[in-house]
């Protein structure tokens, strides 16, 4: 199970990456959105969180499903269910009852949508 531990002066936060759907930057803070609806905030920037996620998967020995989109968010592609150019949003879902909507700029969403489409086309067996 990939996870990481973030120690702050007064608390310690253990982040289970299997359940993390989104990490969103808010200034010098990062807010974690879990697919179950829970949230957690830590006092570090998104670049440091990105490195912690990579480290968590390196220790677990599995490839990371996390992708950085722009300067403000990292998503877990295991929960990706929809990319909407018109509404400029990405929907992350547990495919049962919970979903998280992420607003993304047009250039980022277009590039990401094309990358996902290409990955599916290249992996399709005809």
Image (cartoon, rainbow, N blue to C red):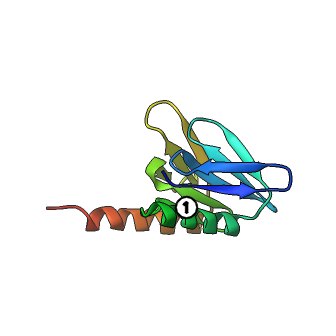
Q: Element at badge 1?
A: helix
Give how far across and how far down residue 117 sits, in percent: 36, 63
Is residue 81 visible from the viewing direction of this image?
Answer: no
Is residue 58 visible from the viewing direction of this image?
Answer: yes
Read off the residue under disc 1. 56
| Quadrant hosting residue 23 | bottom right
Residue sitting at the far right: 10
Residue pictured at 44% horizontal, 31% vertical: 96
Q: Is 25 on the left-hand or right-hand side of 19?
A: right
Quarter of the figure that contains the C terminus? bottom left
User: How many neighbours does mark 1 have within 10 angstroms: few (below 14), some (14-19), or many (20 or more)?
Assistant: many
Residue sitting at the far left: 126
Residue pictured at 55% horizontal, 56% vertical: 75
Q: Is 61 on the left-hand or right-hand side of 106?
A: left
Give how far across and how far down residue 32 sits, in percent: 67, 49
Residue pictured at 58% horizontal, 64% vertical: 69
Question: Which is nearer the eye, 116 or 2?
Answer: 2
Give how far across and how far down residue 12 sits, in percent: 75, 50
Q: Give the answer, above or below, for where 59 lies relative to 2.
A: below
Question: Which is nearer the eye, 79 or 115?
Answer: 79
Q: Is 39 on the left-hand or right-hand side of 114?
A: right
Residue pictured at 85% horizontal, 56% vertical: 9
Q: Give the answer, above or below, for where 94 lies relative to 57.
A: above
Counting labels gives 1
Q: Give the answer, above or below, for where 38 lies relative to 31.
A: above
Question: Which is nearer the eye, 16 or 36?
Answer: 16
């Amino acid at each position: 199970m990939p996870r990481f531990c973030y120690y702050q002066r007064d608390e310690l936060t253990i982040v289970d990456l299997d359940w993390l759907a989104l990490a969103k930057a808010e200034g010098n803070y990062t807010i974690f959105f879990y697919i179950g609806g829970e949230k957690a905030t830590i006092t570090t920037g998104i670049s440091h969180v990105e490195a912690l996620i990579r480290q968590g998967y390196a220790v677990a020995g599995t490839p990371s499903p996390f992708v950085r989109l722009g300067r403000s968010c990292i998503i877990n592609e295991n929960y990706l269910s929809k990319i909407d150019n018109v509404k400029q949003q990405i929907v992350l879902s547990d495919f049962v009852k919970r979903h998280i909507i992420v607003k993304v700029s047009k250039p980022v969403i277009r590039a990401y949508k094309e990358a996902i489409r290409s990955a599916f086309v290249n992996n399709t067996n005809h």
